[in-house]
Image: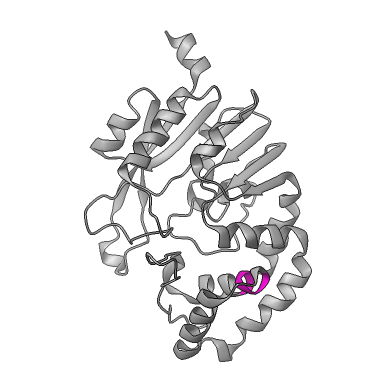
């Protein structure tokens, strides 16, 4: 079995454990487009000629561009923050404040990696003012992902990174494109949402609009989400199947119960053949 590549970021809701299941469901194509790339596990463990990787989070995308362009310098500079002295709650909050007030893209990228690895549970969360507000993680010795950064940088030679609203990615599709959409998931309960990944959030209207765009796309679109009554209705025109997965966002391992993961494939050509 081929060894899978891990992302260099910790990421709540990351798809590392599901990459095989996702690859089995992705149609063939030349370019994979991810409107919600996140940590990039699908990108790192799939085999397309080209990638268009997008996210609404500018901190994430700017860091990816830097890692692609100058990985060795980034690694050298980022290592500084992984000294034992920085694994300290007071220093963490000091650097979090520095990050929120920083305008320099390169410095923000270094601090973004630090906050990701030293913050709580791989969360990436902003308040309504756009301030990063994830608490200190209290880990014994956070891992510095040098190997993973180099792997990401090497594969990024095939990738273009953009920071646009997800809707824009559907406007200029080529016939040989395939889209994988991993949006912020529909909450399983009112208490299940860990608040906003981006300062403006991802609403139920966005969920419905994404399903509409996928349904009307001239290219194949695979969408993943929680298996709920709402998503079953939103994806009713797609070819759907589900699996059970473990969620690790809960702080208590005893409450981490398996939940249903829904895969919805919108494929106009397949629909035509079936009819």
Q: Is residue 261 magenta?
A: no
Task: Residue at 28% x, 30% y: name it.
Answer: 233
Residue 98 position, x and y percent, is 54, 81
Q: Residue furthest left?
A: 190
In the image, residue 246 sits, relative to residue 210, either above or below, namely below
Magenta part of the protein: which range?
A: 106-110
Task: Residue at 70% x, 46% y: name it.
Answer: 159
Quarter holding residue 242 = top left
In the image, residue 25 sits, relative to residue 37, either above or below, namely above
In the image, residue 88 sits, relative to residue 6, either above or below, namely below
Residue 241 position, x and y percent, is 38, 31
Q: Tell me the chief SS of the magenta region.
A: helix
**In-front residue for pair 242/270:** 270
Q: Is residue 104 left or right of residue 239?
A: right
Q: How is the image coloured?
A: one colour
Residue 123 position, x and y percent, is 43, 65
Q: Is residue 166 left or right of residue 207?
A: right
**In-front residue for pair 59/275:** 59
Q: Is residue 105 visible?
A: yes
Task: Residue at 56% x, 87% y: name it.
Answer: 86
Q: Is residue 265 visible?
A: no
Q: Quadrant of the C terminus?
A: top left
Task: Residue at 48% x, 54% y: name it.
Answer: 14
Residue 161 position, x and y percent, is 65, 49
């Amino acid at each position: 079995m081929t060894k899978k590549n891990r992302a260099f970021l910790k990421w709540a809701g990351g798809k590392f454990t599901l990459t095989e299941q996702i690859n089995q469901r992705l149609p063939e194509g030349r370019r994979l487009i991810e409107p919600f790339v996140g940590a990039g596990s699908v990108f790192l463990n799939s085999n397309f000629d080209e990638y268009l990787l997008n996210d609404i989070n500018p901190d994430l995308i700017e860091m990816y561009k830097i890692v692609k362009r100058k990985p060795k310098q980034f690694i050298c500079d980022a290592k500084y923050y992984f000294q034992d002295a920085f694994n300290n709650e007071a220093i963490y909050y000091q650097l979090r404040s520095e990050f929120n007030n920083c305008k320099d893209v390169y410095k923000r990228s270094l601090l973004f990696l630090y906050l990701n690895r030293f913050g709580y549970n791989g969360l990436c969360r902003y308040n309504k003012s756009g301030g990063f507000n994830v608490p200190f993680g209290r880990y014994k010795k956070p891992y510095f992902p040098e190997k993973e950064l180099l792997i990401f940088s090497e594969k990024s030679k095939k990738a273009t990174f953009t920071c646009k609203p997800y809707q824009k990615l559907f406007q200029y599709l080529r016939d040989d494109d395939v889209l994988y959409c991993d949006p912020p998931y529909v909450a399983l309960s009112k208490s299940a949402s860990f608040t906003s990944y981006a300062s403006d959030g991802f609403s139920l209207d966005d969920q419905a609009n994404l399903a509409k765009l996928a349904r009307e796309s001239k290219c194949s679109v695979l969408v993943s989400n929680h298996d709920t009554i709402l998503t079953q209705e939103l994806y009713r025109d797609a070819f759907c199947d589900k699996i059970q997965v473990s969620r690790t966002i809960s702080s208590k391992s005893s409450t981490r119960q398996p939940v249903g993961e829904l895969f919805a494939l919108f494929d106009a050509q397949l629909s035509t053949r079936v009819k």
